[in-house]
Amino acid sequence: MPATTAVPPTSGVATRVAAPGGAQFAVTLGPLLVATDGSESADPAFVAARLLAERLRAKVDVLAVFESTPLYFPPPEMLALPIDFDAGAMERLGERARRQSRTAARATVEWPVEVCAGDPAPTVRRIARERGASLVVTGVSRHGITDRVFGEDTAAQIADITDIPMLAATSAFTGLPRTVLVTIDLDSPQIPSTPAIHELLSEATTVYFVNAKPAVSTTEALNLSFWDRMYDDGIVEAYERVKSSLDLSGNVSQELVRLTGSTAKEVLNFAEYAKVDLIVVGQRRGSMLRRRFGSGLPTRLLRATTCSVLVLPRSRRHVAAPMSDGSARTLSTRTETITDRGQWATRLAALSRRNAGRTVTLELDDIDLGAQAQASGYPFMGADYDHNDDRVEIMLGQRGPGRGHLTHSVDHPVSIDFLHRSDGKLLALRTANERGQALVSFEV
């Protein structure tokens, strides 16, 4: 096995953060973790880390992950590689990382460098957790998604699984951002008020809160006017919720921008038009969507962005039930997939009877528009399969005459999934067709 240059975990340092009203409070700030492959595309990560570290008085750790390339030689010409083949490559990678600390970052103190072998994205996540990092900082490569670097490809992989905020810095990151774009949808939570995020946004003069609404043609609703009002009201609520969490100065221009179309495409187009320095994007709730259909919004943005991107992880809420001693136990889940159309109507009718009135979130994933939350916090009316039209209808809203409701149709479905907790509680209903899927998540 290749040797690993181990560095003891860096202890947190105390810093003082301004609270609303001007009060100061002390917090323990974990290190900034710079992930690098030693290439030029990672240089901006060192620059960004130095700028933030100087202001936060934070420590910086450097992590270089060596991903060995397997070499195959057909018999009988099989060739044995020297035992130190990987070890020598790791030593050279470590030296490049130390050189970046001296040249790209111009650090006044030597930053500790750790070199280890493994799959880059999971390794970065693991080390960040172990060290209690406050921010992971990477570069963004423009050399194509097949490059195995801490940039366009690996940075996107980290963004999809990270549970610590991640900053992917481009070569334009020479100072803290002035113009910031925050992506929002119906389900956007408040932005965490951490010292690293607070300092990163401290020099912002203009902040755009951008939402891209799906085109009407992709959402089949029986009452489009009600759908529009529900969606628009939800976006205003999300805007106020996210804006208040930033607690920016009154001198900062803050604007809600409403767009229509593919989220990634519209966000990137607006970022270029407005000369945005930083895009702030949160991981979406649909982890099931990403597992089945691939990349989420952070990934799509990172693969095409020309400006830096801050990825905010979605908080992980464990499904738990109280035990007799008052503690909590995590319940396992099971997924049932049904492809037999003959069962769909009966199963959906039973599901509707048991779960009507429960609060849900509806998310759609379309091959053109990507994944988006469509409605959040609304009661579930039911779901049904229409044999004649070959479509599943999902109904949200209030029962009774004159009460608004939304019906979303999934045409020509190919499968229906039921995600249950081990105690039988329904967690999610997924209906998929050749173009994507609709996911109904039930609050527990």
Image (spheres, helix red, strand yellow):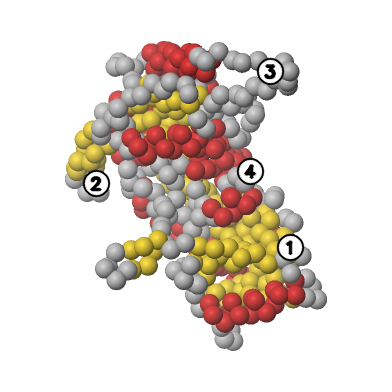
Secondary structure under the numbered disc 2 in the rendered image:
loop
Q: Which residue is mark 4?
A: 265
Q: Nearer the viewer, mark 2 or mark 3?
A: 3
Whole-angstrom CA distance, mark 2 to mark 3, is 64 Å
Nearest to N terminus: mark 1 or mark 4: 4
Q: Nearer the viewer, mark 1 or mark 4?
A: 1
Nearest to N terminus: mark 3 or mark 4: 3
Q: Report which quarter residue 31 is drawn in.
A: top left
Q: How would you rate the neighbour count of disc 2 (Cα within 10 Å): few for under 14, some for 14-19, many for 20 or more?
A: few
Nearest to N terminus: mark 2 or mark 1: 2
Whole-angstrom CA distance, mark 2 to mark 1, is 52 Å
Amino acid type, label 2: Ala
Measured as percent of width and height from the top left, residue 345 is found at 70, 77
Asked if labels 3 and 2 touch by Cβ distance under 8 angstroms, the answer is no
Name the residue rendered at 68%, 23% in the picture. Answer: 72
Res. 78 mark: 3
Looking at the image, residue 414 sits to the left or right of residue 328; the answer is right
Of residues 333 and 38, the one nearer the viewer is 333
Asked if labels 1 and 3 touch by Cβ distance under 8 angstroms, the answer is no
Task: Decide: is 42 above or below 383.
Answer: above
Q: Which residue is mark 1?
A: 414
Q: Which residue is mark 2?
A: 19
Asked if labels 1 and 2 touch by Cβ distance under 8 angstroms, the answer is no
Name the residue rendered at 42%, 26% in the picture. Answer: 63
